[in-house]
Image (tube, grey):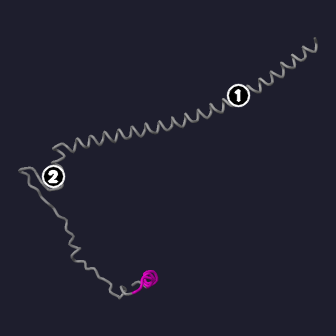
Amino acid sequence: MIIKKKKNVAGKIFSFKLFILASVLIVIFLGTNLGREYYRKYQIQKEVDSLKEDISSLERNNYKMSQLIEYCKTDEYKEAQARERFNLGKEGENLIVMIESNDNDSEIEIEEKNDGSENLPNYRKWWNYFFATKS
């Protein structure tokens, strides 16, 4: 009878160690899978947040564009554009058109160098450009 108790105790200890080893392996396996899923969820949430920001930005731009379209449909906008583009005015208004003139442009003469460089080969023109004396 004593021998049977030792085998039962030894069997219980061996099965207990085996149970702990199996439990540790299962916990490690489940922990790694849980970590992967948590990281994947984090990445997806980050992408969702980014897309929500894009949506809100596009909605703001859409609202601004719709306001601009509504403004462009008004008579006020049409009148302002007619005044600006076509120099038009209301009845009874006197318009003064001022034109900028550059008097200096007519007085300045551009001298062209005619030193026969048109007939030179391209490499010679570059050589003269970089190494010729400039006066």
Q: Quick check: 59 left or right of 126? A: left
Which corner quadrant holds the C terminus? bottom left
Q: Nearer the viewer, residue 87 or 42?
A: 42
| Dot 2: element | helix
Q: Residues within 10 Å of mark 1 (few under 14, many from 20)?
A: few
Q: Quadrant of residue 20?
A: top right
Which segment is the magenta one? 120-132
> Which numbered disc flags the more N-terminal residue, 1 or 2?
1
Residue holding disc 2 = 82
Answer above or below: position of 18 versus 48.
above
Which part of the image, by quadrant, shows the N terminus? Answer: top right
Residue 123 belongs to magenta span: yes
Q: How crowded is mark 2: few (under 14 residues within 10 Å), some or many (20 or more)?
A: few
Residue under the point 33% across and 84% down = 113
Q: Is residue 39 magenta?
A: no
Q: Does 124 appear above or below 30?
A: below
Q: What element carries label 1?
A: helix
Amino acid type at image mark 2: Ala
Whole-percent x, y for residue 57 in the image: 38, 40
Residue in front for this viewpoint, 100 or 54: 54
- Horizontal side of 103 relative to 7 (left or right) equals left
Q: Do the residues labelled 1 and 2 touch (CB within 8 Å)?
A: no
Q: Classify residue 61 by image quadrant.
A: top left
Residue identifier under label 1 = 26
Amino acid type shown at disc 1: Ile
Residue at position x 61%, y 35% in the image: 36
Q: Where is residue 13 in the image (x, y as percent from the top left)?
A: 84, 20
Q: Which residue lies furthest to the right in this view?
A: 2
Q: Where is residue 55 in the image (x, y as percent from the top left)?
A: 40, 38
- Tell me which residue sits at (19%, 65%) in the image: 100
Q: Which of 4 and 45 is in front in this view?
A: 4
